[in-house]
Amino acid sequence: MGLLHKGRIQLLEGYCYNILMGKFISQAAIPKLLDHLKKTYDVFAPQSKNGEVVYAEVQNSSNLILGCETTLLPPKIYFLPPEEELFKVDVGRVQETRFEKQFIVFGLSIKDLTAIIQLDQVMSKEPADAFYQQRRAVSTLVAVSDKEVGVPPGGDLILEKISQEDYRTIILSDKGRKIADLPMFKEAKLAGKAKPQGALSKLDQMLTDSEFVAKAVEWSRENYPQVWERLGKLCLGCGICTYVCPLCYCTSMEDKTSFDGSACSRCRLWDACTLPGFAKISGGYNFRPNQKSRYFNWFYHKFVRTYKETGQAQCVACRRCTKYCPAGINIEKVLEEIIGKFQEAQPIRKF
């Protein structure tokens, strides 16, 4: 084959690769899409509020922030709320909370979408969390990515930006197809390709080998306790890292009674294993009496126990815990330090 002929074939292949066929939506049509969806669903999406980007119910579609990587609180707030009433006893009758109104979480980042899919696995393990599952059953997940998605983690619909104005649809479920069949989406051929993801962060790189990270963290308990002594003094025990994490799911129960005693309710609230009272039991005994043991437990659960149970770390490298930690603890640097010491003790590999 001549070089000229070969070059033409390569050019043709490259051209065909950049012609994306399927359904598309323009950026200008997305507010119209949300206005239409609001007629049937409650719609929640990233919006700016007091200098932060937060998930909130969409009132004005023009306030939507597309392509947002990190919000203040993760989208787990819609499936595992900070506080929720599980059931109520009123005049001797038990009324269990039911979730029937369909809702959409729109504009998820790929990392937040990945976290929800991982949380689905956790909450479906027996005994399954019925309240979480009820909310997921009436929800639709729509992610928006400014970069190439690659292998979708799950969800219902992903909008992948392929040009300055257009998003192509990646339909992942019947719920997603129902949205993509709306008239705001067009069937067309468009030249374009999403931007590549770019280089992985150090934390992302480490998480590609969750087994190695798990071994290093487990090793550090006995062989490098200095790091936990130091972090135990730094950690304020405020629980913020847990609250902003899209994968932490610790909760506690609280019963509330009306003033006249005629009704009571059981509520579930967010809790955190870094808080002083989390491991306290009857009689006042505390299984983790100091901040060092509590903070290590947070790491151990994320990177060791969850790996042993699910084959992956309980972290998607969203960096919320680092961004909002008032003590300035950076888990990427902590893991890097632990892995470095682990490798010095038994040289294996480097990231």
Image (cartoon, helix red, strand yellow):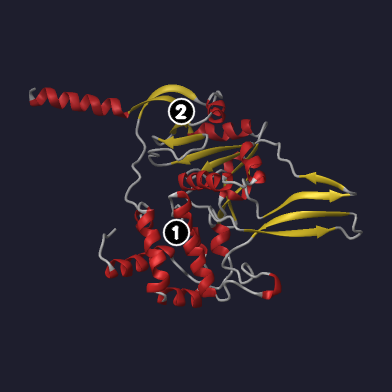
**Farthest left residue?**
2
How crowded pointer 1 is (Cα within 10 Å; few <14, some 14-19, many 20+) is rated as many
Which residue, given by chain and number where applicable, does mark 2 sit on?
24
- State the mark number for residue 124: none
Tell me the kind of residue under disc 2. Answer: Phe
Q: Nearer the viewer, residue 9 or 126?
A: 126
Q: Residue at x 54, y 74 (%)?
A: 291
x then y, percent, for residue 186: 48, 23
Amino acid tagged 1 = Phe
SS at badge 2: strand
For the N terminus, the image quarter is top left
Q: Quadrant of residue 166?
A: top left
Residue under pointer 1: 303
Q: Is residue 325 left or right of residue 251?
A: left
Q: Nearer the viewer, residue 61 or 111?
A: 111
Give the quarter of the figure containing the C terminus: bottom left
Residue 324 x/y as whole percent: 52, 63
Ranked by sequence position, the earlier of labels 2 and 1 is: 2
Q: Is residue 145 above or below residue 173?
A: below
Question: For the point 62% across and 73% down, which residue is it?
Answer: 286
Q: Residue at x 14, y 27 (%)?
A: 7
Neighbour tally class for label 2: few under 14, some 14-19, many 20 plus, Cα within 10 Å: many
Mark 2 or mark 1, whichever is nearer to me: 1
Relative to 86, is 172 on the left or the right? left
Q: In this rendering, does residue 314 appear at all?
A: no
Q: What is the C-alpha distance between the residues marked 2 and 1?
A: 39 Å
